Image: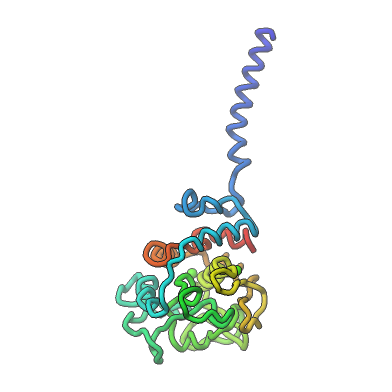
Amino acid sequence: MSVAQRGRWKTWAAISAALVGLTLPALTAAPAGATTNAYDSTYYKNAVGKTGTSLKSSLHTIISSDTRKISYDAVWNALKTTDQDPANSANVLLLYSGTSRSKALNGGDVGDWNREHVWAQSHGSFGTSAGPGTDLHHLRAADVQVNSIRGNKDFDNGGSAVSGAPGSYTDSNSFEPRDSDKGDVARMVLYMAVRYEGGDGFPDLEANDSTTNGSVPYLGRISVLKQWNEQDPPSAFEERRNDIIFNSYQGNRNPFIDHPEWVEAIW
Ligand SMILES: [Ca+2]
Ligand SMILES: [Ca+2]
């Protein structure tokens, strides 16, 4: 190699090194829409970078590894903490209606709030023993009458206005929450689909595109839930309750609040 050749080689080597430095991060970049989360290098380390059934399987293992469960009676006090109104610590914020109501008004009478199973209990008939029936990630404080109107309906757009829950609609077989609760509902339902895969004596819960699921362990409609997840991103309220459930109750997280783009990555 001549001096001139050596010089050109050194220049090329330097350029190549620079190109490697420039292109490597691009080759390993996360997919479009990916977000980062404080738990990526710890809690989610085995899931980050995966998609499809591989991601779902990995997340199932992660969110099932801590088996702390609470009783249905203990859910009352837990909701007083997880669903506390950020503007008034004496109240809880009710799902579907957005009403702020005294924590002391928990019960079954008109004007009270009670424990709404966003994944309706009858869809898999899991009841209220410790497990899916007491899983705080899909249990929310709701007005007694509004909860009764939602009943065990699948989720979908459309219907007539729901009394006591402005912006919510219902028809004979489906319920549409108000806009600011749409994403919350989607992420709660899809958490349940990943958390419960048929182990521990509980049914394998899955989301599908039907609104006539009845008592089978399915809940719809997945195509609409995906839209709702996009249009109503995770709020500070959801992030706070995810942290409380993780740190103080169940030791597990709802991955779709931490990584809403994982909904599209799986479904
Ligand atoms: Ca929301
Ligand atoms: Ca499942």
Q: Which picture quadrant has residue 173? A: bottom right
- Examine the rendered structure and indicate whether residue 175 appears above or below residue 186: below
267 displayed left or right of 136: right
Q: Is residue 134 visible?
A: yes
Task: Give percent across and percent down for residue 189.
Answer: 55, 71
162 displayed left or right of 241: right
Q: Which picture quadrant has residue 208? A: bottom right
Q: Residue at x 53, y 84 (%)?
A: 150
Q: How many marks?
A: 0
Task: Give percent across and percent down for residue 47.
Answer: 56, 53
Quadrant of the frame with the N terminus: top right
Report the residue that reaches farthest toward the top.
Answer: 2
Q: Residue at x 41, y 73 (%)?
A: 70
Q: Is residue 231 visible?
A: no
Query: Which quadrant contains ligand 2?
Result: bottom right
Task: Give percent across and percent down for residue 158.
Answer: 61, 81
Quadrant of the frame with the C terminus: bottom right
Identify which residue, 160 or 147, lies in the foreground: 147
91 displayed left or right of 150: left
Identify which residue, 125 or 191, lies in the foreground: 125
Report the residue that reaches farthest toward the bottom.
Answer: 110
Identify which residue, 174 or 168, lies in the foreground: 174
Report the residue that reaches farthest toward the left.
Answer: 90
Q: How is the image coloured?
A: rainbow
Q: Residue at x 35, y 71 (%)?
A: 81
- Examine the rendered structure and indicate whether residue 266 appears above or below residue 170: above
